[in-house]
Image: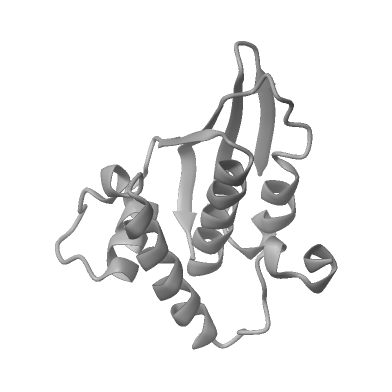
Amino acid sequence: MITTDVQRHGTVLVSITGTLDEDAGAALGRALDDVTADERDLMVDLHGAVSMDSGGLLHLLALHRRAENLGLRVLVVGWQPQPQQLMADVAGIRGRHSATGERYAVAGFRRLIEERAQRARDFSPDSSIRTWDQHPARAA
């Protein structure tokens, strides 16, 4: 389940609970629909995200890219062990519980993760799934 809440003082808070996977795409895609010029920040809270797959990671990256395009600063907090380890694995960082949360803020690292997550999903059994921002209707 994904909940979104526009907080006062210019911050959009997106809290994610449960599994961040392909099914999260629609909710994440709507998370920034009502952003106004008064909002300056996006905070994504992963404290409740117990698991994530490569499709969920791609949706998270798409949300981040959209927020930056809207001029929002992005902060992702509360990395849980499995999502953090998935991102480390996708990035090719060895060792359990690698400090990927801090690296996530670096644009080059996000591009690397996005490319590798896309490749991982392309080679998965159901490679027909797309992120919400890759859907043909969104491209128009």
Q: Is residue 100 left or right of residue 24?
A: left
Q: Quadrant of residue 40?
A: top right
Q: Quadrant of residue 105?
A: top left
Residue 137 x, y percent position in the rendering: 85, 68
**Quadrant into which the N terminus falls:** top right
Image position of 66 with respect to 92: above or below: above
Q: Is residue 102 left or right of residue 8?
A: left
Residue 77 x, y percent position in the rendering: 40, 34
What coloring was used for the rendering?
one colour
Residue 115 x, y percent position in the rendering: 43, 73
Image position of 15 with respect to 88: above or below: above
Is residue 86 visible to the viewer in this orientation of the structure? yes
Residue 79 x, y percent position in the rendering: 37, 42
Residue in the picture at 68% in, 57% down: 25
Residue in the picture at 54% in, 53% down: 60
Image position of 45 with respect to 129: above or below: above
Image position of 85 with respect to 28: above or below: below
Q: Nearer the viewer, residue 59 or 138?
A: 138
- Counting every numbered tag in the picture gives 0
> Furthest-left residue in view?
95
Q: Is residue 71 left or right of residue 103?
A: right
**Quadrant into which the C terminus falls:** bottom right
Is residue 44 visible to the viewer in this orientation of the structure? no
Residue in the picture at 66% in, 54% down: 24
Q: Quadrant of residue 38?
A: top right
